[in-house]
Image (tube, helix red, strand yellow):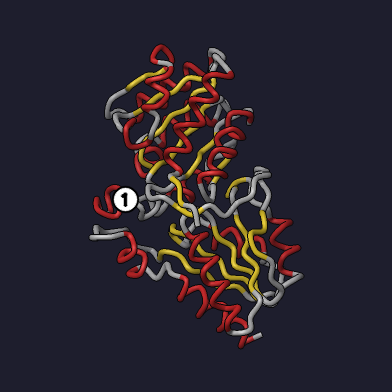
Amino acid sequence: MERYSQRLAYGETIVALGAENPKVVVLEADLGKSTMSALFQKAYPDRYFEMGIAEANMISTAAGLAASGKIAFCSSFAVFASGRAFDQIRQAVAIGSLNVKICGSSCGLSDFGDGSTHQSVEDIAIMSAIPNMTVLTPADADETRLAVRAAAAIDGPVYIRIVRNDVPTYTKGGFVPGKLSELRPGSDAAIIAHGAMIEAAMNAAAILETKGISARVINAGTMKPFDTEGIIELSEQVKAIVTAEDHSRIGGLAAQTAFALRQSCTPMDYVAIEDKFGQSSHSLKDLMEHYGLTDTAIVNKTMALLRKS
């Protein structure tokens, strides 16, 4: 399975957008070589603004640029992009529904070595709670490219969540904001995931197949607007639903799915981070296992639900 960097896909796509549209500008908070926005700096230095370690100023400046007709892309680690600049995002960008696109890079636990201060386990919840905000959670590099282009086309603020590590390519194009997409067919159970957990979901479905269980894998590439109707339709086609995310169970995919299923009889469970911060580790694999974000956990929860049903 081909693996590619979502960060690199982001950087390459904003460069392409810059060539197509002179209104595209990019702002960075001292992490351009990590978020890959530095690619835009090299291509279009006159439209690139290095703001230093000052995320709040970055968002405020982006709001001003957007108010003057620009399409402003901002990037930083997800924990800083969503947390340090929350007030500016809410007050300066979202209330006026300005054309500011925020890339939360190295999301979830993917910055495994730097510990809880750099690991965004709550960014989806924060950004989804802001009115007028669209929240995109692409599965791989190909979908990241489509998500960045979709963000540029959306009239209003957008948050894009991408991981630090390279991920396998599972999507096949056709990204539609606000809609679920099927990555693998199945009739017994559905596994809904996004971002880094797509690989675990696909692996879990393959394991379940060896046990005689047909598991559908669904990619939730958009967390807001959430495809509630798609979830309800899905619940009528399977016997159980399990969600999988590298985010807190509070305010993320598990919570959104449970809300969508509030009048459904289809049982659901989740694989997610409990109400805890991250921590540093020697490897992402060790960290994911510590928090139970594995294909084994998805398999076990799916089988348990099917036994009950």
| Above or below, comparing residue 212 to residue 89 in the picture | below
Seen at 48% across and 50% down, the residue is 125
| Above or below, comparing residue 4 to residue 256 in the picture | above
Q: Which quadrant of the structure image shows residue 237?
A: bottom right
Secondary structure beneath dot 1 equals loop
Instruction: Identify the image quadrant of the C terminus.
Output: bottom right
Q: In this view, does 295 lie to the left or right of 280?
A: right
The amino acid type of the residue labelled 1 equals Asp
Q: Name the residue under label 1.
A: 111
Task: Give the percent coordinates (x, y) of residue 288.
Answer: 36, 65
Task: Give the percent coordinates (x, y) of residue 28.
Answer: 36, 27
Question: Front-most of 257 and 173?
Answer: 173
| Above or below, comparing residue 47 to residue 211 in the picture | above
Task: Give the percent coordinates (x, y) of residue 218.
Answer: 63, 60
Seen at 50% across and 57% down, the residue is 1
Seen at 40% across and 18% down, the residue is 48
Instruction: Please rate how many residues cluster around mark 1, counting C-alpha atoms within 10 Å: few if below 14, some from 14 to 19, many from 20.
Output: many
Residue, far bottom: 307
| Above or below, comparing residue 110 to residue 24 in the picture | below
Image mark count: 1
Task: Give the percent coordinates (x, y) of residue 81.
Answer: 39, 37
Q: Which quadrant of the structure image shows residue 189?
A: bottom right
Seen at 31% across and 64% down, the residue is 287
